[in-house]
Structures are given as structure tokens and as C-alpha cells.
Image: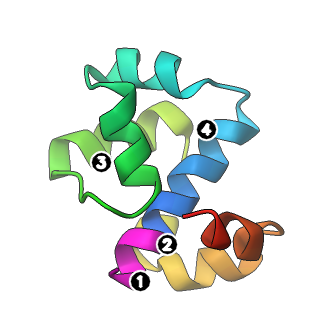
Amino acid sequence: MDDTKAMLGAIIKNARLNMSMSRKTLAATLGITPKHLMNIEHGKHRSGFDLLFNMVRELNIPGDAIFYPEEHCRQLKDFDRIKTNI
């Protein structure tokens, strides 16, 4: 698995959980299936620019977290736990 996909997936999942948003709710807002979102969160799928843009805006993810995910992941308290669940 690509580490970048895993890191971005962890960032997205962490942001969603921090907003107490269900996968189903976010997926509906984005116009995708919960399974598609799950695959993105687990680092199995890459999202296109438009979808990534919408996720970043919906979840209030800072832009630097997308361009420098390794730095942002180091700041996540639960990253090791999140990464092992990917």
C-alpha cells in the first residue's frame, strides 16, 4: 500500500471522527458511497482532485495536511492506532 494514500486516508478519517460525523453522512454529502469513502480512508483508493477538494472543505482539513501529510500525521495522537486499522 502506498504510504501517501494511507496517510491521507488517516487524515480524512481522523477529521471525520473529530467532527463526530458518520461515514454514511459524509459520503452522502460528497455524493459517493460509504464503501468508496471507507476505501479512501483505508488507503485503498485515491480520490480525484474534485473529491479531495470537497472532503478538505467539508472536514475543515488544513491545506498543509494534504501537501505535507507526513508532518500532519506525526501530530495525530492516534495515528499509530489509525494506521494499524488501515
Residue 7, disc: 2
Q: Crowdedness of circle 2 by 10 Å Cα count: few (<14), some, many (20+)?
A: many
Q: Main structural element of the magenta stretch: helix, strand or loop? A: helix
Residue 50 falls in which quadrant of the image?
A: top left
Mark nearest the camera among 1 and 4 is: 1
Q: Name the residue under label 4.
A: 16
Measured Cα–Cα span from mark 3 to mark 4: 13 Å
**Vertical placement of residue 36 versus 46, above or below:** above
Measured Cα–Cα span from mark 2 to mark 1: 6 Å
Tell me what residue is drawn at x 55 percent, y 41 percent. Answer: 60
Residue 10 falls in which quadrant of the image?
A: bottom right
Residue 54, disc: none
Q: Can residue 62 be seen in this view?
A: no
Q: Crowdedness of circle 1 by 10 Å Cα count: few (<14), some, many (20+)?
A: few
Q: What element carries label 2?
A: helix
Q: Nearer the viewer, residue 80 or 55?
A: 80
Residue type highlighted by circle 3? Leu
Measured Cα–Cα span from mark 2 to mark 4: 14 Å
User: Going from the N terminus, do you reach mark 1 or mark 4 first?
Assistant: 1
Residue 27 falls in which quadrant of the image?
A: top left
Q: Name the residue under label 1.
A: 3
Measured as percent of width and height from the top left, residue 33 is found at: 30, 25
Measured as percent of width and height from the top left, residue 2 is found at: 33, 81
Residue type highlighted by circle 4? Arg
- Residue range in magenta is 1-6
User: Going from the N terminus, do you reach mark 3 or mark 2 first?
Assistant: 2
Tell me what residue is drawn at x 38 percent, y 39 percent. Answer: 37
Measured Cα–Cα span from mark 1 to mark 3: 17 Å
* Mark 2 touches mark 1? (CB < 8 Å): yes
Q: Is mark 4 on a helix, strand or loop?
A: helix
Question: Along the horizontal axis of the image, is 72 left or right of 57?
Answer: right
